[in-house]
Amino acid sequence: MPENDTVEPQPPRSLFTLDLNAIRHNAETLRRAAAGAALWAVVKADGYGHGAVDVARAALDGGATALCVATLAEALELRAAIPEARVVVMGPVPADGVVTARDAKLEVVTADGFVPEGVPVHLKLDTGMGRWGLSELPSPSRNVVGVMSHLAVSESDPAFTHTQTERFREATDGLEGVERHLANSAATLRHPQAAFDAVRCGIALYGISPFGTSQAADDLEPALRWESHLALVRLLERGDSTGYGRRFVAERPTWIGIVPVGYADGFRRDLTGTEVLVDGERRRVVGTISMDALAVELRGELPKGTQVTLIGDGVAIEEHARVAGTIGYEIATGLDSRAPRAERVVVG
Ligand SMILES: *Cc1c(COP(=O)(O)O)cnc(C)c1O
């Protein structure tokens, strides 16, 4: 091979940076809002796409006293990484998973009246979610350590949230030796009367507003940055199009940049029209987003390799969610930060 033919190192297609300082900050904000109730960190779905183990450690540092996940498999991953943490599996555990849960020192939730033996159990009451949950509490057995319920409209309907809170209070009043927990992020931030003994917070811990509005208003800091670069810059002549379906046709000579990130990375197909930062300036995503690439409209020619910020520096997950007609939760959990498609680093 000739000497000058050495291969230049390629930048990653995209880079995710998780800021643990932000997670700790958000944990503190939530603890303050919970006014005396314990903070339990919800890290299901790989920590809402942020990385469950890293987020869990930072949340515990920030004062959280337990971790909550949806499945037994998620709990086992946490248990292997953080042997001493309290871990609650909130979703159904199959009967043949109870022994595994017991051996891994997990806590489980029952929503159907069957109280497994040998593991700490939380009873889940239905106070209005209309999903999983008991309509009445069974007589408590020794291994019941908690009673919980889940709120259906805590981000949007204070009256129904109040109704659910009061139903929960009445159903659990006088119970002794169990922890009562009801509130999620939105309730923790807006309905302090729903805090009881512990609050289970997910979305706000990541610095994403449960209300779909500004995180800063609730003293939350976004914890995730997502960056990529212009892999190709080209000039479209009038009438030229970019991408599948010819959904963007240049009305005049237009510089566009191609970013090597697409819907397989979590930049959804319905994000056309959203804004990202190109070299620090807001630019529109145009045309059809493909599996591995998207196009941005530029003001002029820019060098290949120019930085593109897809999330961060004021480009918020909530904003992308509005464009896609969904919620921040779905954008976050859809992100794929795993190698080999992306690189992921942790700072703080
Ligand atoms: C996901 C979940 C939460 C966390 O909700 P956020 O809105 O993300 O704070 C709390 N409780 C239960 C039962 C959940 O499933």
Image (cartoon, rainbow, N blue to C red):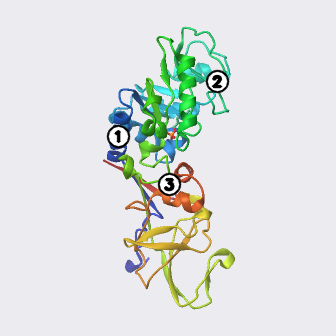
Mark closer to the chain start, 1 or 2: 1
Q: Choose between 259 and 237: the one closer to the eye.
A: 237
Q: Choose between 76 and 212: the one closer to the eye.
A: 212
Q: Residue at x 63, y 33 (%)?
A: 129
Counting from the top left corner in percent of width and height, residue 252 is at 55, 90
Mark closer to the chain start, 3 or 2: 2
**Which SS class for mark 3?**
loop
Query: Which residue type carries mark 2?
Result: Ala
**Which SS class for mark 1?**
helix
- Looking at the image, can residue 169 be seen? yes
Classify the position of the N terminus by image quarter: bottom left
Q: Residue at x 34, y 32 (%)?
A: 63
The residue labelled by disc 1 is 29
**Which SS class for mark 2?**
loop
Q: CA distance from mark 1 to mark 3?
A: 32 Å
- Mark 2 Cα shell of 10 Å, populated few (<14), some (14-19), many (≥20): many
Q: CA distance from mark 1 to mark 2?
A: 31 Å
Q: Is residue 166 left or right of residue 226?
A: right
Query: Which residue type carries mark 1?
Result: Thr
Query: Which residue type carries mark 3?
Result: Ala
The residue labelled by disc 2 is 111
**36 in relation to 26, above or below:** above
The residue labelled by disc 3 is 339
Residue depth check, mark 3 versus mark 2: number of the one nearer the observer: 2
Residue depth check, mark 1 versus mark 2: number of the one nearer the observer: 1
Counting from the top left corner in percent of width and height, residue 259 is at 50, 71
Q: CA distance from mark 3 to mark 2?
A: 37 Å
Q: Are marks 1 and 2 in contact (CB under 8 Å)?
A: no
